[in-house]
Amino acid sequence: MSQAEAAGPVHGERARTAPRAVSPLWSLGLFRSELLITFRRWRTLALLAVLAAVPVLVGIAVKIETSDGGTVGGGGGEGPAFISQITNNGLFLVFTSLAATLPFFLPMAVGVVAGDSVAGEAGAGTLRYLLVAPAGRTRLLLAKLTAVLTFCLAATLTVAMAALVTGALLFPTGEVTLLSGTTVSFGEGLLRALAIAAAVALSLLGLAALGVFVSTLTNSGIAAMAATVGLLITVQIVNSIPQLDGVHPFLFPNYWLSFADLLRDPVYWDDLLKNLGLQALYTAVFGSAAWARFNNRDVTA
Amino acid sequence: MTEPTAVAGEDSAVISTQGLTKRYRGGQLAVEALDLSVPRGSVFGFLGPNGSGKTTTIRMLLGLIEPTGGTARLLGEPMPEAVRRVLPRVGALIEGPALYGFLSGRENLLRYDAADPTADPRTRAARVDRALERVGLSAAARKKARAYSLGMKQRLGLAAALLQPRELLVLDEPTNGLDPQGMREIRSLVRELAGDGITVFLSSHLLDEIEQVCTHTAVMHRGRLVVQGTVAEMAAGARGRLAVTTPDPVEAARVLKEQGVSDLVTDGEELSGDPPPGDLAELNAALVRADVRVRAFGLRRASLEDVFVSLTGEGFDVAG
């Protein structure tokens, strides 16, 4: 049409000979875009909101129950770990909330985001356009993995921050008495809380890789989410059956609650390191499986 | 035409395939031994009924599907091996647009542009705005894509194909599901792009669309390439039908049959049939000699539909 458009982005014959100078840094654009997409979805924000609500509810429940001067649980039954210490120190709400959300809430949220990562794009048809852009299959998968791992960290920090704020508002804070009886300053307590959040986030890596692998198997985001969460529940059930303890050391949630060992003095590293090793193993195995599958797959959706 | 070298020379085909075959895991043969050659600068109509293997071919050309046999070259380079080098110079619309409904039209384009490792982030916003302008979506750029009409989505899909300078546009059924106005807009945009020197590879199941827009065409049928050539050659290849209008149809039919006209159909005062080889003027003279009054006499131009029917012996609506 007009001259303005002739100077526009489309001019085939001239473009053919002009080579484009490409910076390798431009490849990172996809990673940034992937993070943006993940955290702009309503579903992601809703999951984070639910996770943030857990510590608030626990904090309020404890406050109400102990407002008459009684103790948590009234002596009968048992709640999540550390719950009886919350009234002494609000910081313990962080530990309680992470212990309460780690078995199901946190991994379920991760399962939803990981399961949808590739399958959701395939189902919506956007996968084919990303691939002809061309995003590159390996690069796209790495971007997806990075976004899911970032979500693991964000989800954990959401729980921890919500718990810290709620705990500080509702309960006294101060020196922290560790599980081994030693008392440390509030500052060190905070540092240990941060370390615990990191340990919890790392605990979710195995499941995240598993979810991304499942996600490369299907074109339905819902199916991949359901399969990942279903796997998580199955594994958690198997992990709670004592007769099957032979396989327990190989199940990804087996050492999840080892993060409590960070509250000992000195820190008891054994299970923490076993947990990290197991998560690294799962990430390596299912990450490679996802790569192998995604690179050889016909994209027909 | 043969494709001897990997060098993308001036005259080389933009798309060339040799024996390209795809057999799906179920054993279904979607594309069989396809030898396709798309000349640079052409508007190439890839024609065939739904289910004839057009989309599978396009997906193989773009590296989305691995062929089970044969080779495909895009811009002179082998696919799918050269995906990363070739595809930045190719814009594509495959089986309709696919968008992120929760993002605005503009954000959708930013996302797709970010997926291209050869796209300069410094010029990204400007290129996105120009592409939006080009397809006439500037006013709706900030609306969420889920609120777009089908026509707007289609145009946004085209905008995504125009984010960078392209040498080749692969458009799979670009007017599918559009109203006549939308179809006209897309077609005029395609002509405009072709005018800029971009080769356009356009698949369609609409014969008249190919006739209106394309310079070259290839016809697919049940996974096989039936014919390829220029649109003009094709239409010329099939002889037109003789059409005669006369108030004396019975007498005219007798004379024409004597003269060797076959497949004669009489509809009121109009007769049509396949003329024998030779000069049509002789037929007219014979009619006049027999005192048949002739109102109109002529050859109806063959359409691509006639070509298709004569090549496959089937109506065009039959899916493979």
Image (cartoon, coloured by chain):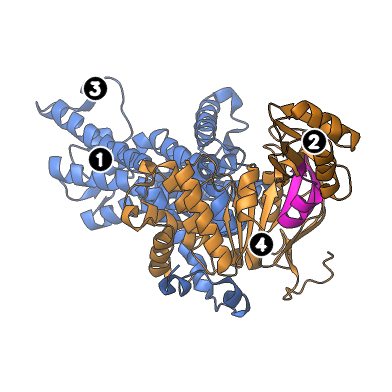
Chain colours: A blue, B orange
What's the residue type where badge 4 is placed? Val
Q: Tell me which chain the residue with mark 1 is part of.
A: A
| Left or right relative to B134: residue B17 | right
Whether the magenta-drawn stretch holds residue B35 is answered as: no
Q: Distance from label 2 to label 3 (Cα)?
A: 119 Å
Q: Residue at x 30, y 21 (%)?
A: A77
Looking at the picture, do discs 1 and 4 lie on one chain? no
Instruction: Tell which circle, 2 or 4, labels the residue nearer the N-terminal end.
Output: 4
Residue A22, compared with residue A201, is above or below; it is below
Is residue A263 visible in the rendered image? The answer is no
Element on which disc 2 rests:
loop
Element type at mark 3? helix
> Nearer the viewer's eye, disc 2 or disc 4?
2
User: Where residue A117 sits: x, y (%)?
Assistant: 50, 45
| Magenta span contains residue B235 | yes
Q: What residue does disc 4 label?
A: B83
Q: Amino acid at mark 1?
A: Leu
Q: Are marks 2 and 4 in contact (CB under 8 Å)?
A: no
The stretch of residues the image draws in magenta is B217-241
Read off the residue under disc 3: A75
4 and 3 marks on the same chain: no
Classed neighbour count for the residue bearing mark 4: other residues with Cα under 10 Å, few (<14), some (14–19), many (≥20): many
Q: Which residue is mark 2?
A: B291
